[in-house]
Amino acid sequence: MILCGLAITVARWIYTAELLLPLFSIIITFLVSLLLHVCKIFGGADAKALTCTALILPQNVSTSLTPIFALTVLLNTFILLGILYTAILGYNLTQYLKGNDLFSELDSKSAWKKLVILLTCIWLEKPPKSKRFHPLKHIPDSKTEASPIFTRNRGSKEKMDSFKSKSNAQPYGKGVWVYFTKPLIPLITLSVMLSFFQGDFLLFLIKFL
């Protein structure tokens, strides 16, 4: 994608003499992607995908709040993430309405931390088998603790295996909170298509309302 983007950028400069806006778009997108990666909001592949998007198509072709296409993609990606978090919240509230005790191990957490957990984690009746899920609750030597996960990279298969082995000897309750890495690459891909044909989804909603 980088090679294709560079070739398109050079071709655009040769045939249209446009260089300032593409360079500005690429630099801004790279810095924003780097910041998101350093803050553990984006993974390496996500940051590269957004930067490559700026290389291939630096300028918006649809109505948008910004002339930089990649920033429109980023905004729409966060909107799609918001929809995903809403779906996660709906699932957890459904489990609560079914009578499951979701907050027994979260009593010591503040209200905003509970909200973060409700939006980013899911409650399951037993530890999952998938490697994509990481335990929110870890079991130290003598007590069980639940810690909210704020970064994408925390947790591992080893932690889940350790959690399962310890929970067999030490009951963890009737359910378990798990964190899973959000599928940003599919969301970015969907956002690219949405941004190309529709522009800013937020601007579209404002006009619609």
Image (cartoon, grey):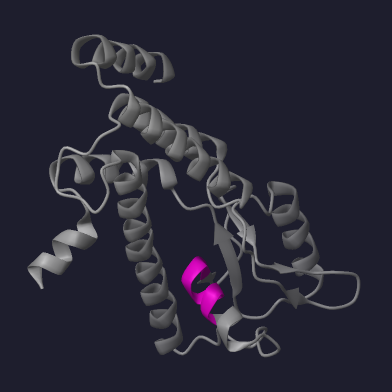
Q: 80 or 60, which is in the foreground?
A: 60
> From what the image shows, is residue 108 above or below residue 37?
below
| Residue 163 sits in quarter | bottom right
Frontmost residue, 66 versus 162 = 66
Based on the picture, tell me whether residue 128 belongs to the magenta stretch.
no
State the quadrant of the N terminus.
top left
Q: Residue at x 38, y 81 (%)?
A: 94
- Dominant SS type (magenta): helix
Q: Is residue 61 above or below residue 177?
A: above
Q: Is residue 86 left or right of residue 116?
A: left
Q: Is residue 87 above or below residue 64?
A: below
Which picture quadrant has residue 57? top left
- Whole-percent x, y for residue 151 in the image: 62, 57
The magenta-colored residue range is 115-122
User: Horizontal and vertical percent for residue 169?
Assistant: 81, 70
Residue 105 in the figure: left or right of residue 56: right
119 horizontally vs 66: left or right: right
Q: Quadrant of the C terminus?
A: bottom left
Residue occupying the far left of the picture = 208
Q: Is residue 165 above or below residue 172?
A: above
Q: Position of residue 85 (x, y in %)?
A: 40, 66
- Give percent across and percent down for residue 181: 53, 52
Q: Residue at x 64, y 64 (%)?
A: 149
Nearest the camera: 89 or 175? 89
Q: Residue at x 65, y 70 (%)?
A: 148
Q: Kindly identify the residue that appears in the image at 31 percent across and 31 percent down.
A: 21
